[in-house]
Amino acid sequence: MEISQDIKKRLFDELDSKKEEMVSLLSRLIAYPSVKGEPSEGAPFGLPVRRCLDEALSTLSSWGFATECHDGYVGTAELGEGETVLGVLAHLDVVAAGDGWTGDPFTARIADGRVYGRGAIDDKGPAVAAMFALRAIKELGIPIKSGARLILGTDEENGSSDLAYYFKKQSPPRYAFTPDGSYPVINIEKGMIRVSFSSESQPCPGGRMLLWLEGGAAVNAVPGSAYALVSGVGASEVIKSSQGLFPGVEISCKEFEGGSLRIDARGVSAHASTPESGKNAITALLGVLSRLGLEDGGSKAASRLSSIFPYGESDGLSLGIKMSDRESGALTEVLSLVSYQAGRLECSMDIRLPVSSSVGEVKSRLLPAIEGAGFKIDSFGGTEPHRVDEDSEFVKTLLEVYEEMTGDRGSCIAIGGGTYVHELEGGVAFGAEFIGEDNHMHSFDEFISIDRLVLNSKIFALAILKVLNSGRL
């Protein structure tokens, strides 16, 4: 449906006039350190998360919305009185602050036309933009033919158990978008598999052997560092055997009294969905160890591990799972965590599978490769790829809004990561990051531009109106 120029002007003028209120609300939400914590009654993900949700719902209620808190998992607000056709999903939980911030990550800092703070772009800023979009439609009395529901969740960063709980009790909307990604529209998200596996060997003290191995910080990241402690090996031997074999990874050694040697590998960390942008320190270190001719069972297990995870490979070739398709690209895999001590080697990996494949297909090829290398599977879990037809009227409507509001061509994109609607049939990501932007998501000094905050709100408001009033959906 075409929205009249008069309605659009009134809508956009209203949102422009609310710029300072948007910044104020975002600042209040940032002040809650809504990192997942210890559960308590009515606060399944910790009190700070629940208090942040209460702040948002209280604000929506003060604007006249009918709101509901669903046992502390999810909060909702209703727009319109007809059938709830559209869901807008945002989340109020955040990742841990980490290091490197210019100021307190949970005190909003306004500078250079930006709001800095943990959650500014992921996903409290977009949540605020969506809240004000619904408020403007409501307060201006713009007619709508059907209803929309704002769904504010609290566990996106740790697996979306909040939505799983909510949708066990409530029917999902026919259409849904989340501002938990980027523009124009993310309609394809690769599937994901996480596998943990291990091997046991009898320690044999003395001689050339592996004493300790540790690497990686998170299962969904290319490990940027790893180290091993070995005995019976000199630093010169390590450097000579690894010279030029692991480009992008720095190998260094430190000798200790008693004949032990620490080997450090320094690579480049990256998200597991884009392993080509990183340098895997674990696989490089495994490659070093496999060339030293160590004699113990742990070293032999490390060598077998290196044979199925060779340095520089992230397409699963050596595991027998290499595959790709035109729509979503190639399968990627990352050996992301390793730990060895006292004869036990433990490992975890992350796989992103293309939309044309399935968890079952990859599993049937992956597990024999891992077990064939002498490892035992400890855990296996996966989610199927997610796809919404790019020719659907819903997707075309969102792309029309994007083109109208930005002047840029709208097209669908596929990603290796997952968004808040991965498990929701018909759900897509729509915003909130614009092409070419780096808002330091999940990093220090995360921010959102104030102008972009308002622009997002305008885009969401126009999209909501077009979907609710469309005769094609």
Image: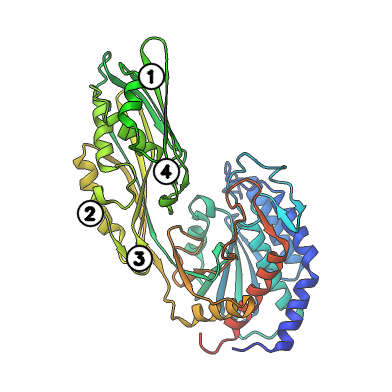
Number of the label disc, if any, that sits on residue 261: 1
Q: Amino acid at mark 3?
A: Val
Identify the residue position indicated by label 4 in the image.
279
Q: Mark 2 vs mark 3: give the one in front.
A: 3
Q: From mark 3 to mark 4, how far is it between C-alphas?
A: 26 Å
Locate residue 286, reporting x and y percent. Answer: 32, 34
Is the N terminus in the top left, top right, bottom left or bottom right quadrant? bottom right
Q: Residues within 10 Å of mark 3 (few under 14, many from 20)?
A: many
Circles 4, 1 touching at the beta carbon (< 8 Å): no
Cα–Cα gap, marks 4 and 1: 23 Å
Question: Residue at the top extreme?
Answer: 258
- Nearest the viewer among 322 and 65 is 322
Q: Could you tell me if residue 141 is visible in this image? A: no
Q: Nearer the viewer, residue 194 or 56?
A: 194
Mark 3 → mark 1, Cα distance in angstroms: 45 Å
Q: Write the residue at 80% across / 71% down.
A: 17
Q: Secondary structure at mark 4?
A: loop
Q: Residue at x 29, y 42 (%)?
A: 310
Say which amino acid is labelled 1: Leu
**Looking at the image, do the residues carrying marks 2 and 3 touch, with CB atoms under 8 Å apart?**
no
Circles 3 and 1: CB distance less than 8 Å? no
Q: Measured from the top left, where is residue 171 in percent x and y? A: 49, 70
Q: Badge 3 is on which residue?
A: 355
Disc 1 to disc 2, C-alpha distance:
40 Å
Comparing 322 with 389, the one in front is: 322
Q: Secondary structure at mark 2?
A: helix
